[in-house]
Amino acid sequence: MSTTTCQVVGFLLAIVGLAGCITATGMDMWSTQDLYDNPVTSVFQYEGLWRSCVRQSSGFTECRPYFTILGLPAMLQAVRALMIVGIVLGAIGLLVSIFALKCIRIGSMEDSAKANMTLTSGIMFIIAGLCAIAGVSVFANMLVTNFWMSTANMYGSMGGMVQTVQTRYTFGSALFVGWVAGGLTLIGGVMMCIACRGLVPEETSYKAVSYHASGHNVGYRPGGFKASSGFGPGAKNKKIYDGGVHTEDEVQSHPTKYDYV
């Protein structure tokens, strides 16, 4: 999978996951009345993070918000905080990831800057997904604990006779939406972090060397001078070099370290 495809897929998954987290937070069916012992009832109760609702058999539904904060259970307040933190981090990561997309060029932004922004948004998406999953899991654990405590209170120790009837709550649809949304956000963040590696520019392992061409191709031989050993035109020129006399042919066949071409 190419870097652009991985980044775009992660971005889209994070958008869907963030929308699911917002939807789950606003839903009222976090806990619903358990109808196992009483499948036929005229009143159906369900609760959310912000209000509790009662639906009658006639179809009329009445919801009552929680008008208190300190009077709510500590676990419910913790779930609220986790979901809000996850939504805020996801929204910030979404804004950062828009400018980090490789297919969008803003000014003269370098690939290294896009890589850092992609990594930052990916980490934010991962944290947001973990917050959503943790909040939903904490609420589900609270429901399970209250369910079995209510079941234990309904039955006495003498012959298993029913003493009291209590309303028991089970998992609502918002929990499953939150789990799926948190997972999508987490996967989107992981894909954004993977795409970050493809955006980092590769560093070369060698250093560049500047080259300046010479203006003239001139042969240069320092030192020495040529002398003629005879007076005729066929006489070979000799070169006094390093204290010895050598012919020109010998010098050409045996170059020394002082010759530069």
Image (cartoon, rainbow, N blue to C red):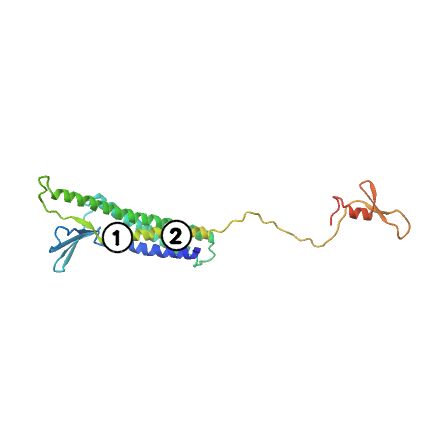
Q: What's the residue type where badge 2 is placed?
A: Met
Q: What's the residue type where badge 1 is placed?
A: Phe
User: In the visual, does 161 lie left or right of 217?
Assistant: left
The answer to whether one can see residue 121 in this image is no
Residue 48 in the image, given as x and y percentages of width and height: 21, 51
Q: Earlier in the sequence, mark 2 or mark 1?
A: 1
Residue 33 in the image, given as x and y percentages of width and height: 16, 51
User: In the visual, does 19 lie left or right of 6?
Assistant: left
The answer to whether one can see residue 169 in this image is yes
| Mark 1 Cα-neighbour bin, 10 Å: few <14, some 14–19, many ≥20 | some
Residue 189 in the image, given as x and y percentages of width and height: 37, 51
Q: Which residue is mark 1?
A: 176
Q: Where, quadrant-wise, is the N terminus in this rendering? A: bottom left
**Of the pair 125 and 250, the residue shown nearer to us:** 250
| Mark 2 Cα-neighbour bin, 10 Å: few <14, some 14–19, many ≥20 | many
Quick one: SS at disc 1? helix
Q: Residue furthest right?
A: 231
User: In the visual, does 85 lie left or right of 101?
Assistant: left
Tell me how many marks there are: 2
Distance Cα–Cα, label 2 vs label 1? 23 Å
Q: Residue furthest front?
A: 159
Residue 191: mark:
2
Residue 131: mark:
none
